[in-house]
Amino acid sequence: MSKVAFVFPGQGAQYVGMGKDFYEQIPVSRKVYTIASEVTGLNLPGLCFKENEQIDITEYTQIAMLATEAAMLAALQEKGVKADVAAGLSLGEYGAILTAGAMSLEDVFRVVRQRGILMQKAVPTGGAMCAVLGMDGEKIAKICEETEGIVSVANYNCPGQIVITGEEGAVAAAAEKLKEAGARRCIPLKVSGPFHSEMLKGAGEKLAGVLVDVELKEFSMPYVTNVTADYVTDISEIKELLGRQVYSSVRWQQSVERMIADGVDTFIEIGPGRTLTGFLKKINKNVTGLHIEKVEELEKVVRLLCDKQ
């Protein structure tokens, strides 16, 4: 039986103007931005739609991205489109949690606002990230383990595209070893910190503290976590997993493969950019990847899914 997954991109896909047409044309989406502004004390429409430098600063990027994804999700749900499962890359996992109904909209915004602040403050000097192309993930992980210093896999994005993270010197040393071992390219990334490395463990532990008072709800549908690439089946696991997620590898390829193995054949990427749709093509060419970033794409997806049903 055909299954649909809603998937949400992470930090890095943001741009000024994202979600503006949803805000202007769809009342339920406009309401989401209003709630995000009220909860966080930030002007989310201004942050997302007007030229500014804050949108690329982690503590603002994360809430801007999540508000936009939530606004698009609300518009899709209002059309009656439902998912069988959800997942999100790093920050995008909060979109999946929202889809699953495990947290209220207000609580998701409160948590993500604090997540961005904590990660921004925790960014240590001397951190780096590097994209490794053309090499198996297990081999990359092994070479990282054998390299002196802190360096590990940050993202298993798709076959042939893995990101490593950690101390600047250790990342550089691992990159040299990876090239010698046959990696096609190792590309240093312009990022503000070594995300998803143990160097951000403190931020993850503090986020777990933020989550203590958050009320969780029983799932209306399952979601897959980055940390294990498996379904979260017990709400008591959520808070601990979200804390660990800040400094653990993002197992995106494995998450997608798990959903496909369980019958998902249509993935709808909800949010700015087409990053996840691009990864999907490299993970499995036999499934359908749809994308919602503009209102006209929303209408197209609704028509396609209605036709399939």
Image (tube, rainbow, N blue to C red):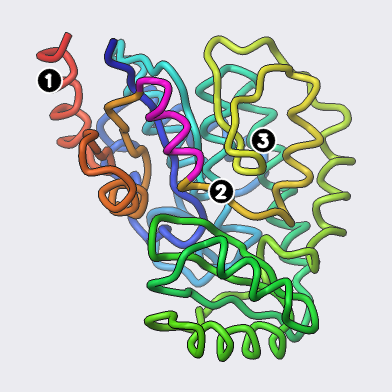
Name the N-terminal-most of marks 2 and 3: 3
| Nearer to the camera, 136 or 290 | 136
**Residue 12 position (above or below residue 6):** below
Residue 59, numbered circle: none
Secondary structure type for disc 2: loop
Residue pictured at 40% horizontal, 24% vertical: 74
Q: Amino acid at mark 1?
A: Arg
**Residue 45 position (above or below residue 171):** above
Residue pictured at 27% horizontal, 38% vertical: 292
x and y percent of residue 189 in the render? 50, 79
Q: Is residue 268 left or right of residue 84?
A: left
| Residue that numbered label 1 is attached to | 303
Q: Which residues are magenta?
A: 254-263
**Residue 295 position (above or below residue 282):** above
Q: Amino acid at mark 2?
A: Arg
| Residue that numbered label 3 is attached to | 39
| Residue that numbered label 2 is attached to | 251
Residue pictured at 30% horizontal, 36% vertical: 22
